Amino acid sequence: MPVHNAEIARLFEQLADLLEVEDANPFRVRAYRNAARTVSNNSKSMADLLAGGKDLSKLPGIGKDLAEKIRTIVETGRLPLLEEVRARTPAALSDLMKIEGLGSKRVKVLYSQLHITCPEDLQRAARSGRIRELEGFGRKTEEMILHRLEHFGDAQARTRLVDAEETVKPLLAYLQATRGIKDIVVAGSFRRRSETVGDLDILATASRGSPVMDRFVAYDQVAEVISSGKTRATVVLRSGLHVDLRVVPQASYGAALCYFTGSRAHNIAIRKIGVRKGYKINEYGVFRHDKRIAGKTEKSVYRQVGLPCIEPELRENSGEIEAAGKNRLPRLVSVDDIRGDLHCHTRASDGHDSLEEMVTAARAKGYEYIAITDHSKRLTVAHGLDEKRLLREIGQIDRLNDKLDDIVILKGIEVDILEDGTLDIQDKLLGQLDLVVGAVHYKFNLTRRKQTERIIRAMDNPYFNILAHPTARLINERAASEMDMEKVMTAARERGCFLEVNAQPVRLDLTDSHCRLAREAGLRVAISTDAHSTKGLDHMRFGIDQARRGWLEAADVLNTCKLPDLRKLLTR
C-alpha cells in the first residue's frame, strides 16, 4: 500500500515530540522536525521519488540516515526508532504537546508527577484541581488548559485541507481509470475549500455496467467498508477519513453537485426560493410537480431560482444569495492575478534553498517580483539574521538584481515583534529594505488588550509594512492569539500597513472571516506563501482559496499590483 507524505511527516513529528519529552539532543529533535516539513512541503510523493530512483538524501535537510528512514517507512509503513521510543514513552504525549501552552517540559512534568498520558487524563486532573499544585503551573495555567481542551477534540476530528487533498488525489486518479467513468469530483467542504474537512463526498457519473463501486471498495487504502451498494458506498481510509462515493445519473449531476457542495444553510435557502416559485429542489434535480426541469448542470439549477451560478467557495449562506440576487457577487481573486510573493525564506535563516534557487522558481511562475524575508535574530531556532548578516544578504540581493531583467528581488525581513511592540532590528537598517514583515513568534498568550496594543505599537514603526500570520494559529495544533482584530485592521489602514493571508496550509491565517472583515474595512491584504523552499511557493493556491472564501477580489490584494504601484503602497 502506498504511504503518503503526510503519514511520513506525522511519524517524524511524533518522533520529534517524544524525543523532546525525553530531553534528547535539540539538534536531533530539530532534524526530525525539518525532515517532516521537507516531506510535507514536497509536491511529489516520496514513494514515487524512490520508485523513480531518486536519491532522497539530496533533498533539503535530508541526509543519508533520514533518507533510509523514509525508505523504510515507504516500504513497511513503520518507523522502528519511533516504536523503540514509544516502548518507553507513551505515544499519546505527542497529542498533549499540540495543546496550546503545553511544551515538552510541562508535558514531562505532567507525565512524571501525575501520570498523565492523554487529553482525557489531563482534563480529569485539571477539573480536580491537581494541576495547579504542580511547581510552575498554578491556577491560571490550569484554567488555560481546560479552556484549550474544550475545542481540542473537535479540531482533531477534522482533517486539514492539504492532508485531505493528498489523500484524495491518488484515489481520484484510481477511480478515473475505471471503465465507464465520465465525471468525478469531490464535493462538500473540500470543494468549498474549507481549511479543514470532515467526511469526503465524491460524486461521479458512469456508463451502465461500470465496475466503479466494486473498484472503490477494493482500493488498497481502504481500512473498512461501512456500506456498499450499486450507486453508493462508504469506506474508512487508512488515514481515518470517511469517504462516500455516489454514482448519479447524468441528468442529475448538476443538482447533486449543488446539493452536496453547498453548506446545509445555503441549500435550505435555495430550496426555500424554489418553493416560492413552485419548484421542488433536491439532489436529483429541479422539479415542477413530477417533471424535472433542470439539474444537468449547476447553472441550470441556479437559473431556475433566478440567480447566477454562485462560486463553490461562497456557498455558506453568509450573504451570497442576496448578493447574487442583486448581481453583486464579487469577481473572486485567482492565482493568475498574483504578480509576486511577499514572504519567502532562504537557507540564510531556516529555508531549504538558496537565494538564487528561490528567485529561479519565482521566475518560472512568471512573477514580476519576489520578496526575500528571512527571519530576524531573536528567532534563534530559525537561525535568524542579525544586523551584520542582514547587511550581507542586502548586498547579495543587490548584486543579483543587477543581473536580472525579468524579475525584481525585494529586500525584506521577517522581523520579530517583541513583547513590548518594538522590532527586533534597528530602524536605520530597516530603512534600507523594500519591505518589513512583522511577526509574533512568542508570548502568544497575552491578554486580548495587551496583544492588540503590542501589534499596534509595532505598526507605529514607520518602516513596518505587513503583519505576518496575524493570529499565529496553527490549524489543529495551536489556537489563535486573542486580539481585537477590528481595532488592528483600523490601525493598519490608518498607518498604511497591511495584513497577510499566510498560505501555509497549516496556518491559513488570516481566516476567511477575517479576509471578509478586511474587505469591509477597506484594507488590502497580502497573500504570501511564507515559503521555506522552492516547492513552498506552490502553496499560493491555498492562500487564494482562503481569500476567495473571504470574498476578496484582485483589487483587495496587495500583490496583484504591478511593481511601481506596489512600491508606492509600501512607502509610508
Image (cartoon, rainbow, N blue to C red):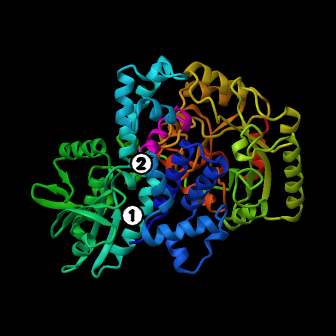
Q: Is residue 378 found left or right of 389 in the rendered image?
A: left
Range shown magenta: 91-106
Residue type at numbered disc 2: Thr
> Any mark on residue 168, and which?
1
Which of the pair 229/132 is nearer the observer?
A: 132
Viewer-nearest residue: 60 or 370: 60
Residue 226 position (above or below residue 55): above
Res. 196 mark: 2
Q: Position of residue 15 (x, y in %)?
A: 52, 52
Q: Is residue 264 left or right of residue 139?
A: left
Relative height, residue 408 to residue 65 (above, below): above
Front residue of 293 and 2: 2
Residue 479 seen in this snapshot: no
Residue at horizontal 28 percent and vertical 44 percent from the top: 264
**Separation of residues labelled 1 and 2 (CA atoms):** 14 Å
Label 1 vs 2, first from the N-terminus: 1
Asked whether residue 129 is in view, the answer is yes
Residue in the picture at 45% in, 39% down:
96
Q: Secondary structure at mark 2?
A: strand
Q: Is 101 included in the stretch rendered in magenta? A: yes
The quarter of the image holding the N terminus is: bottom left
Amino acid type at circle 1 is Val
